[in-house]
Image: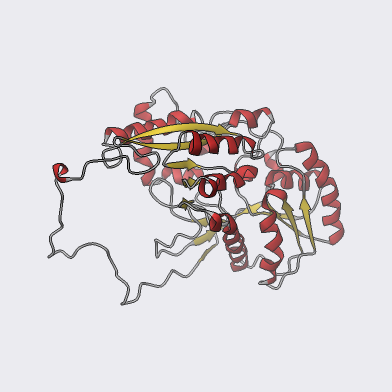
Amino acid sequence: MSVGLVIAACGGSSDSDDDSSSTEPAATTATDGSEVVAEPEPEPSDSEPASTEAPDDEPVETVAPEDLEPLTASSRGVTETEIHIGISMLDFDALAELSLVTEGWGDQQSVYQVYIDDLNERGGINGRTVVPHYEFYSPLGTTEADAACLALTKDIETFAVIGGFVGPAETANNCIVETNDTILVGGRQTQDRLAAANAPWVDTPALRERRLDVFLNLLDDQGMLDGRSIAVIGSVEQEDIYDVAADALAQFGITPVIEALNDAPQGDIVATDARWQVLAENVRSAGADTVLLIGSTQGGVRGVSASGLDVEVWALESSGLENLGAETFPEDADGAITITALTDQQQWEDDSMAGCIDLFTAAQPDVELKDPDQHVDGDEQW
């Protein structure tokens, strides 16, 4: 069974858990067909402007191109003719060597380039050509992410960075927005990281602190918190969220029967599995019937399965279930519950994706694109 937060599709809409731009109610769905609909946000009051558009009877002023001010080198990464953008990309080859994934996302750089070329052919941004600068990084630790940050923000001095860093490398995002005052679109935020940023930082998912609250509220709405004996198992890369999990559960009248931190480094499969041999016995002794995983999702579902624990698994992070890797089998994750956006197939079928798919297919006719539901393990996930 799965619990999902249904939100706007990708390709022109935010996939945030907290999309305040829409008055449509958010819904949760389960495989049994049940649905819970949250109350919509209230309509703006009479004192708030309903629209920023000019009334029909007022003329809209336009400016002829020849009357525009000449373009200048107006900011870092912005010349008279170009805007330099940094793009950080996951190094799937490095992850595959460690058996953490079985495939990647195709040729990421060529995908970015298709859409950047199209943008430039249509005039770029305000008449300036977009010039991309690419850097790969491994998410295991911050060494490569820090190097990518410095390359994009110091060596090249880009105007903005797209992609950011995920996994244990997440702390390197502040190298971009805090240390080097560069705009970031992507990465993973926490309240503390966002508060330290000196440059604008845009990310679509909800903050993890908010994500935990949303997850628990959705579970409560479906009556799934009643009578639970919950073991909270955290991970070092999300220790800040682990630290507040007990307080979040207390709002629903629940005290965890055990709280434990999996301090094995993410990506160290041997250390993670060894740690779970101990954790599993602690969970069993505490009498838990549910394990709430705060990070390290793959290691958690693998550890629960290997130890034969008779518990339900709730995973705060859906990404670990979406890409199990070579060491974690689908049956290990069977029955796990998470909070997620639209499925890959739902996003693929959304009307907003059609133009994106057509554009890429025209530019890369030799690449075979498949529906996500037709994906075969080991094939690149274009």
Q: How is the image coloured?
A: secondary structure
Q: Quadrant of residue 217?
A: bottom right
| Residue at screen point 69% across, 62% down | 245
In this rendered view, identify the residue nearer to me: 219 or 58: 58
In this rendered view, identify the residue nearer to me: 178 or 103: 178
In this rendered view, identify the residue nearer to me: 11 or 155: 155
Q: Is residue 208 left or right of residue 329?
A: left
Q: Does 30 appear above or below 150?
A: below
Q: Is residue 142 left or right of residue 87?
A: right
Residue 127: x and y in percent read 26, 38
Q: Residue furthest top?
A: 366
Residue 376: x and y in percent read 57, 31
| Residue at screen point 49% across, 53% down | 198
Q: Is residue 296 left or right of residue 179?
A: right
| Residue at screen point 52% across, 43% down | 164
Q: Does 68 appear above or below 21?
A: above
For residue 264, say whether it is visible. Answer: yes
In this rendered view, identify the residue nearer to me: 147 or 210: 147
| Residue at screen point 42% across, 33% down | 112
Residue 381: x and y in percent read 52, 33
Residue 257: x and y in percent read 80, 64
Q: Does 78 appear above or below 177?
A: above
Q: Is residue 136 left or right of residue 299?
A: left
Q: Does 36 appear above or below 163?
A: below
